[in-house]
Amino acid sequence: MTASHRTAPHVPVLRLDPTGKDHQGEAARLRELGPVVKVILPGEVEGWAVTTHRLLHELVASNSVSKDWHRWTALRTGRIPDDWPLTGMVKVTNMVTADGEGHHRLRRAVTQVLTPQRVRAMRPQITTLAHQLVRELPRHAGPDGVVDLRAHLAYPLPMAVICDVIGIPGHHRPQMRHLVQSIFDTTASPDEVISTQHLIYALLDHVVEERRTTPGNDLVSALISTQTDNPDILSHTELTGTLWLMISAGHETTLSLITNALRALLTHPDQLGLALNSDTDVWPVVVEETLRWDAPIGNFLARYPTEDLRIGGVTIPAGEAVLAPYSAAGRDTAQHGANAHEFDLTRVQERHLAFGGGPHVCLGAPSRGWKPPSPSKPCSPLSPACPSPHRPTPWCPCRP
């Protein structure tokens, strides 16, 4: 939708479409409107969006903003009701909504268990599952031969993996899949929102109690053990909140990444040809370019200035919500060049923000071996100019 009104002569306003049917068009309009834009969320809830890569990078790393939803004045004072469609993404108790030492404490509880080594050890299991799902695709084809790759590959793969990692027993998984879908439904009715909130934590309470009785080699059991050894490190509410974060974020972002990468390749046959015909492993480059070009999370809620924040020539009052529009920043021409709108596996790889930044950078980034590139611009191993003889990584090793 187009800008509807202005809160001040220099601050444009954009009403965000909760269905996301023209998501990249909306992201382009955010960039066109300026570096800082007032946005209207479902339920007429107001917030802000910082649309350039540089300013968004500064924002997510700033000590002047909080992730604690209790600092959102409109939510704290009751101007946003409990049945707001997005409340399940905001009013949670886990590391995403914690600051400072509280954030470090909750993050350490997970990172001590979910190590890169543990993730790498799962690779054979994940590979087997992926091959199985691909082999089964033909039987899901319709009369026209079309297969829904999102439903039959991108969705079941990360859901099965994250449930294995967390330790969700098989008999709970159908309900868990339903709840994950419900929490990301921005068109849910107030009754559905309240019901989903209750069902999520009731189910997680059941899972925790089952794992207390029958521990396994999974995250729930490991966190319960941590809690038993040191009760001060993790309350029950924090434990279930952490599990919900890992399930919802670990599934939804990977689902979207797989879907977006498949769509990008299938709609860019020249780039698909580059990837398939390369004599080196270029799939890490496909992942990084997809993360930049079509980020799994388009607009991420939220950060709250702890004091009036001057950014991009605009003052955002303390206690108001600021979104991170990763889709808009991913195609910022100032960061990614004049062809930022193009899906191009040979581009010079600039740092993207799909994993966030600052202390709240995504837990999954180190597990993938991800790291920001050096200040010099690394080229892509698919670029004709790249002299690297090495196995390519997301950041080409040919430059120091």
Image (spheres, grey):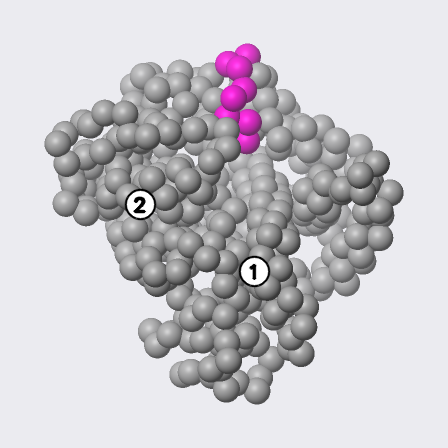
Q: Position of residue 24 (x, y in %)?
A: 44, 42
Of the two numbered discs 1 and 2 on the same chain, state the one appearing first in sequence: 2
Q: Nearer the viewer, residue 230 or 380?
A: 380
Q: Give the range drawn in magenta.
A: 184-191
Secondary element type, mark 2: helix
Kindly report the distance in space between the C-alpha atoms of the residues bearing marks 1 and 2. Answer: 24 Å
Question: Which image quadrant: the N terminus?
Answer: top left
In the image: residue 31, left or right of residue 224: left
In the image: residue 145, left or right of residue 251: right
Question: Which image quadrant: the C terminus?
Answer: bottom left
Secondary element type, mark 1: helix
Residue at x 68% of width, y 46% of height: 154
In the image: residue 391, left or right of residue 322: right
- The residue indicated by pointer 1 is 287
Other-residue count near label 1 (Cα within 10 Å), few / some / many at <14 / 14–19 / ≥20: some
Q: Which amino acid does label 2 sit on?
A: Arg
Residue at x 79% of width, y 52% of height: 134
Is residue 275 visible in the rendered structure shown here?
yes
Q: Quadrant of residue 202?
A: top right
Q: What residue type is labelled 1?
A: Val
Q: Position of residue 58 (x, y in %)?
A: 27, 54
Q: Where is residue 291 in the image (x, y as percent from the top left)?
A: 50, 55
Residue at x 50% of width, y 86% of height: 387
Is residue 355 visible in the rendered structure shown here?
no
Q: On residue 31, which mark appears?
A: 2
Q: Does the magenta stretch include residue 236?
A: no
Residue at x 64% of width, y 66% of height: 273
Q: Which of 292 and 266 is in front in this view?
A: 266
